[in-house]
Structure formats: C-alpha cells, structure tokens
Amino acid sequence: MQINVLEYLETTLQTMPDSTAIVDGTATYSFADLADLSRRCASLIARRTAVRNTPFAVFLPKSAWTIIADLGILYSGNIYANLDIKTPTSRQKKILDNVTPTFVITELSRRDEVIALGIGASQVLCIEEIPSADADSRDHIDAYHSCVDTDPMCLINTSGSTGVPKSVVMHHRSVIDFIDWVVGRFTFDGHTIIGSLSPFYFDIFTLELYVALARGCVIVIIPEPLAAFPVKLVEFLAEHRVTFLFWVPTIMVNMANLDVLHAADLSSLRMVFFAGEVFPTRQLNHWRRQLPESQFVNLYGPIEITVDCTYFVVDREMRDDEPLPIGFPCRNTDVLVLNDESRPCAINEMGELCIRGSSLALGYWNNPEQTARAFVQNPLNPHYPELIYRTGDLVFRNDRGELMFKGRRDFQIKHLGYRIELAEIELACTSIKSIRNVCVLYDKDRKEIGLFYEAPPEITAAVIRAELAKVLPKYMIPTVYRRVDELPRNPNGKIDRQALAESFQKGL
C-alpha cells in the first residue's frame, strides 16, 4: 500500500533514472537529477529545523526549481505551499499571515522581496544553496518513512469570502487516490510529453507532477508569455512533440476563435484534459475537428476534493449548442445530488453536488469555522461519523445518468479556471475611498465580472481598476463597471441582486 506521494518518484528511479523528467527552457533534468536535488533541498531544511507537518512557502516563478523545492519539502516531512509571485503584496501578506510558514524558499534575487512581506531573514532559504547541500545526508529518510497517508502534503490557496484567502489542506492519501485513478483509467508512460501551461500554485499542477512521477512522463514547462500568443503556443507544442495537455478552457476557446490549431503540426497530441470552467461546445467541436485522433476529457471538481472528482470522455458527436456533461464520478468517489431537504434528487431534478470519499481535503488551514461549514456530516448516514463536502454547485443527472452542471448555489464562481468569492471583490471595492456600496455579479456566458457601485461621478472605472490592482490578482478584477446613484433594494432592505443580474445580462 502506497503511503507517500514520493513513492512515485522512488519507484520510477528504479527503472528509468536517466530518463528526462523536466524540460525547462534549455535545461533538462532526469529523474535522478530531480531526486538528487530534492534530497539536497531536504538536507538543507534539516540543517535549519527538525519540524514535521508544517508549511513551507515556495516563492518562485514557475520553473523546475519550484518542483525541486516542493519535493524537497516533502522529503523533509513537511508541507509545500506554492505562492503566486505576481499577486498584490497585500494579498500575499494575508496568505502568509494565515499559513505562517516555517521557512520560505525563494531565489536570491527575490530574498529582499520576501523579507518585505514580513518574513524574517533567518526564515528564508534560497535555491542557490541547494546544489551545495550535503548529498549524502540521510535526514530525509527518517522523515520520509515516518509519514502516514493522512498527513498534509500541500496547501492550495483559493479565494475567501471574508477577504482572507483560504488555504485548502491536501493530504497524501487524497492525491494518491486521484493519481492512481488517472493512470489506471488513461494511458500515460515514458513516451508521454506533458505541455505544462497552468501556474504551479494551481491544482492542475498536482495532476501533471504526480502523473509524471508515477509513469515516467516528461513535463515540458511552457514559457508563460506564450499564453498571449496562440500561434507561437501552437508552434511550441509542435516543436516539443507534446502529447498531453491539461488546461483551463479559456485559452483553448481563444485558440479556436482565432483558428490557429493548423499553424503547426499537432499530430503528436493524443490526449487533452480540461477543467476549471465550462468549455463552450462550439469551440470544443473546433478542437475535435482539427485533432480527430485526440481524446478529449472534461473534468470537474473543486480544490477541496483533490483536483477533480468527475469526468466525461467526449466520445460522441455533440451539437454546438448542447451543454457538455461533467460526466461520472472518478473511482472511489461517490457523488450525492441533494435537494433542499438534503435528500437524493431524482433523474433530471436539480440539486447540490456533494462528495464523499478519501479524495476530500482535510479542510482549510487555520480556519475551523469555514471547514465546519463546508465539510459536514453526511445527512444520509446517521450511524457513524462520515464527512461530505458541499460544493455549492447545482447539477442534475440526465437520462443517460450523466451529471450536468448548472451553476453556483451561492456567490462563489469559477472564472478563468479560478475559484473566486464575489464577496472578496466586494470587500476590496468598498475599501476604496468614496465608494458607498457595491454589488459584484458574474455573467458566466460572457465570462464577465460586473461591478455595480454607488459613488460620485469622478470615481471612474479606471480609478477603481487601479485601486483594485493593488490588492487583487488580475483574474479577480471586474471587467464591466456600472455606476449608479443608488443600488436597488428588495423589500427586506438588501441589495436586489436579481434585478441587477437581469440588467447585467441584458447589457444595461
């Protein structure tokens, strides 16, 4: 029985140590290189502290060194938390204040930036120290073998309704459970070349990394600027003979709209996963026509259930206006569709999607209140303690038994692949001087975040955008602005969100 995700790497080392594990620009790393540098990182950590099961933040641009730091932290018996180096300073501080990492691993050129975030100089480890660390130290061995499968593995930060980002606690068992399903259901081997585009602080990275370690696949890190140049992106995929993608649909929709898939030979691309938001079927059909030999798979799942919990292999022709199913549960995952009375829904009856199984995260780091609200006792089981995760997503099962996604139960959205609490945006907006009141809405069809606000005429959209850019990441900043003298109210005095939503959808 596998206990630790590092066993994927340890097993692959026995059969293909010299095979390429990572391509990062002109640099390549074998699995033996990856293991050696990761163990050196663990030795570096061991010289500084003997802690176990505590968070270490990783403040690095997306690179092979991020992976080395993550695995080094795991070898030391601790928890990694990859940070977005581009997010506003105030948000970074909120994350760090919540996570309270023992150390932050960064590069020498960013050391002062990390210290400016409130991290003590003695708590900063630089990757430049790793190659010279003791290669023969066995400190990591004890930590590695003392792990149990429910120990925390990593923290993934997501939006929080109180203005403080939540840190979801993933554990070894949940990741092993998911990865074993992925490699058992789909074909991955040493010939698989993964085109990695998503940030390493995003949960897609979890699948990419551990599938690669489990099956000896190659991770080719796609330079971040290429996302803005679809033709160059296609040429990069062709040049590196990429065989597998796992992307959020936004960029894929853009590539379909620009009709760039024929810009280079993509015949090596055999499998395309996508998740994080709805992929419009018309643009998906464009991809399928251009790549008829490729397999397309729609995955669904919030971070709280370890990457994804349902999937749909697109194995039939679908009309351009036909909604795409989110499909069926992954192995060892049970999906409950519950009505307002917490009873099972019938076929074609809409209800809240709830999840049970070992894929559930441990909860939110340092946030027992929100953990207790989201991870609750299974209402269908009165006999013994059994947690389920309430996703807040509304779904129904169609006549084929496929799960169909309908939208959010509350004001949490998925935009550009990110989970966002609209309340966090509202909180940031109301902190701007002269803004009296706000309401933030989302149009999922147009993929637009809309801000309705009460403020004097001189508080323009440009002023608000500039202020929000100081506290929110780019993907959370509204794209549509409507200034009003007074927001509409319903009879109980609350903002009439329904009336605003109707006008927003009409473009008013």
Image (cartoon, rainbow, N blue to C red):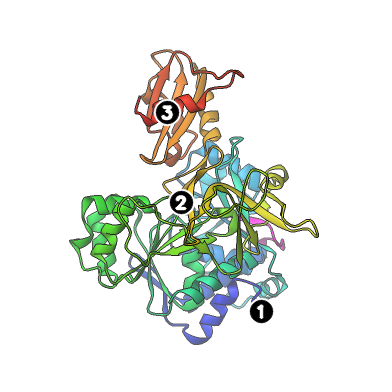
Q: Position of residue 489 (x, y in %)?
A: 54, 18
**Eyeballing the image, is 391 above or below 465?**
below
Q: Position of residue 403 (x, y in %)?
A: 50, 57
Q: Between residues 145 and 394, which one lies in front from this camera angle?
A: 394
Q: Report whether residue 441 is seen.
A: yes
Q: Which residue is mark 3?
A: 502
Q: Position of residue 161 (x, y in %)?
A: 59, 37
Q: Residue at x 55, y 73 (%)?
A: 180
Q: Three-letter amino acid code at disc 1?
A: Met
Q: Between residues 227 and 502, which one lies in front from this camera angle?
A: 502
Image quadrant holding the N terminus, namely: bottom right
Q: Between residues 96 and 508, which one lies in front from this camera angle?
A: 508
Left or right placement of residue 359 versus residue 257 in this view = right
The mark closer to the camera, 2 or 3, is 3
**Eyeballing the image, is 459 above or below 411?**
above
Q: CA distance from mark 1 to mark 3?
A: 54 Å
Q: Which residue is mark 2?
A: 109
Region rendered in magenta? 48-56
Q: Three-letter amino acid code at disc 2?
A: Ser
Q: Report whether residue 466 is seen.
A: no
Q: Position of residue 110 (x, y in %)?
A: 48, 49
Image quadrant holding the C terminus, namely: top left
The quadrant holding residue 145 is bottom right
Q: Which residue is mark 1?
A: 1
- Circles 1, 3 touching at the beta carbon (< 8 Å): no
Secondary structure that dominates the magenta span: loop
